[in-house]
Amino acid sequence: MARLFDSIKINSLKLRNRILMAPMSMGYADEKGLVTDKLIKHYIDRAEETGIIITGHAYVEPVGKFNKGQLGIYSNEHIAGLKKLTKAVHDKGTPIGVQISHAGGATSSSIVGKTPVAPSTITGGKETPKELTESQIEGLLEKFGQAAERAVTAEFDLVEIHGAHGFLLNQFVSPLTNRRKDKYGGSLENRIRFPLEVVTKIREIVGKNFPLEYRLGSDDLNPKGITIEDSKVFAKELVRVRVDSLDVSGGLCGGQPSSLTGEGFFIPQAETIKKTVKIVVIGGGGITTPEFADKVIKDNKVDMVFIGRAFLKEPKWAANAIKKLKK
């Protein structure tokens, strides 16, 4: 029977425990998305006894930026600062991964300086986006690949691809935001095509032994959107293209939907996915107590837990949790 404080491996990466500090965008980067001392301090303050830290989402191209102060990974100019970040966290004995993303239609021209792009001309954010052409989609594939290559150069231990919370990859998968008539739209097989191409591209770049994770927007909480049954199919395909772990969260409904309350509100979705695949599955949502986190692992509902806002309230959440559970 596994416990919260037990070690676990994601591909070649061994973690000292099963606590993942969830990716949260703090707005601490500068106007170009470059790392700042404030951003580094935020992570090193929370590194003690944490199994792995995942940064808030880093945008892969300027038109994919979601908000001010967001971390960037769209140019080689970012590498030096990112390497400074990874070294600072590694000096605390903690692995760190980077979440890479594109906001798609969730952003606005006030942020990116031009009309946002998306799978279809459906308003998912603040304004109506332009529909991506197939050649632009091919270009985006290269952007994701280049971002992953920079992550390896900057000595991150893992790359997480953001496919949840209403951002671009989630927009492709959801029938609510994808009305395309080409090979990227219509059937579930077509709607998951681009995310699978992104994973395939990144796997080619990082190699077979580098840990690769996908944040799965498992449920839109809308009967006309992505359902957990869709995500079971998608999860199997993600395994086929060699994702090592799945971080299960919400789809277009976001990371903290008002309709879900209590500790572990995405654990049921994660448990369903865990029964479907044989890779590491991570779940969470509003977890605040080490006892709850430990129990969902002991009960084999998930392999790891992601902890978000509790880390903002208490930077030493992981260290305190391990100490309490080992009493």
Image (tube, rainbow, N blue to C red):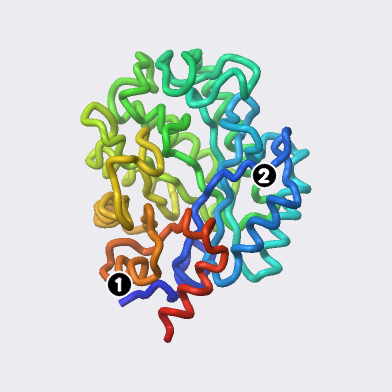
Image quarter of the C terminus = bottom left
Residue 209 figure quarter = bottom right
**Distance CA(mark 1)–CA(mark 2):** 36 Å
Residue drawn at the location 53% of the way across and 54% of the way down? 208
Q: Position of residue 199 (x, y in %)?
A: 48, 41
Residue drawn at the location 24% of the way across and 52% of the way down? 272
Label annotation for residue 135: none
Secondary structure under tag 2 reads loop
Q: Position of residue 115 (x, y in %)?
A: 57, 14
Image quarter of the N terminus = bottom left
Q: Residues within 10 Å of mark 1 (few under 14, many from 20)?
A: some
Residue drawn at the location 64% of the way across and 71% of the way down? 93
The residue to which callout 2 is attached is 28
Residue drawn at the location 46% of the way across and 65% of the way down? 19
- When the figure is inspected, residue 293 is found, relative to residue 233, above or below; the finding is below
Label annotation for residue 298: 1
Task: State if disc 2 and disc 1 touch (CB < 8 Å).
Answer: no
